[in-house]
Image (cartoon, helix red, strand yellow):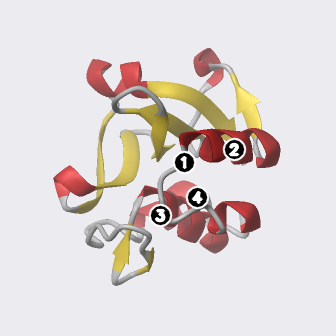
Amino acid sequence: MDIVEAARSFLKVPFRHQGRNRLGLDCLGLVIMSAELAGVELEDLKGYARVPDSDRLRSECDRQLKKVNMSDMRNGDLLLMVFRTEPQHIAIKTDIGIIHSHKADGGVVEHRLDDVWLKRIKGVYRL
């Protein structure tokens, strides 16, 4: 199973801050659980602080994952995103767009990667 297929198995799971199971997931929980189903352990990301810490999230992604250029983005890549000033959101690139757990959408959703979402990307990482 690849990470996109794994992530799709979580579609419609409700959003829950710091959620790490099928009862509820936040964006990082979706990435961690999907990676595990795909056979990839992201141990250090599991310990990510209970309070969002943009510097730590970015540094752990830089340390554990291979950073790639946005022009080389492909399905299964992890997209580090910003909503205000610092990256505090992560999504999985798919053939349709992205899968992520988003509070405003109520949970895990998949949708197009339109211009609004593209502008939010601050880093692309490969497992």
Measured as percent of width and height from the top left, residue 46 is found at 64, 68
What is the C-alpha distance between the residues marked 1 and 3?
18 Å
- Up the image or down, 6 lies above or below 24; here it is above
What is the C-alpha distance between the residues marked 2 and 1?
12 Å
Position of 126 with respect to 34 (left or right) is right
Measured as percent of width and height from the top left, residue 14 is found at 26, 71
Look at the numbered discs 3 and 4 and tell me whether their residues touch, using CB distance below 8 Å: no
Q: Secondary structure at mark 2?
A: helix
- Chain-order first, disc 2 or disc 1: 1
Q: Which mark is drawn over residue 61?
A: 2
Disc 4 designates what residue?
3
Disc 1 designates what residue?
53
Disc 3 designates what residue?
30
Measured as percent of width and height from the top left, residue 33 is found at 55, 71
Q: Nearer the viewer, residue 53 or 109?
A: 53
- Chain-order first, disc 1 or disc 4: 4
Look at the numbered discs 2 and 4 and tell me whether their residues touch, using CB distance below 8 Å: no
- Chain-order first, disc 3 or disc 2: 3
Residue at position x 60%, y 15% in the image? 71
Residue type, label 3: Leu
What is the C-alpha distance between the residues marked 3 and 4?
10 Å
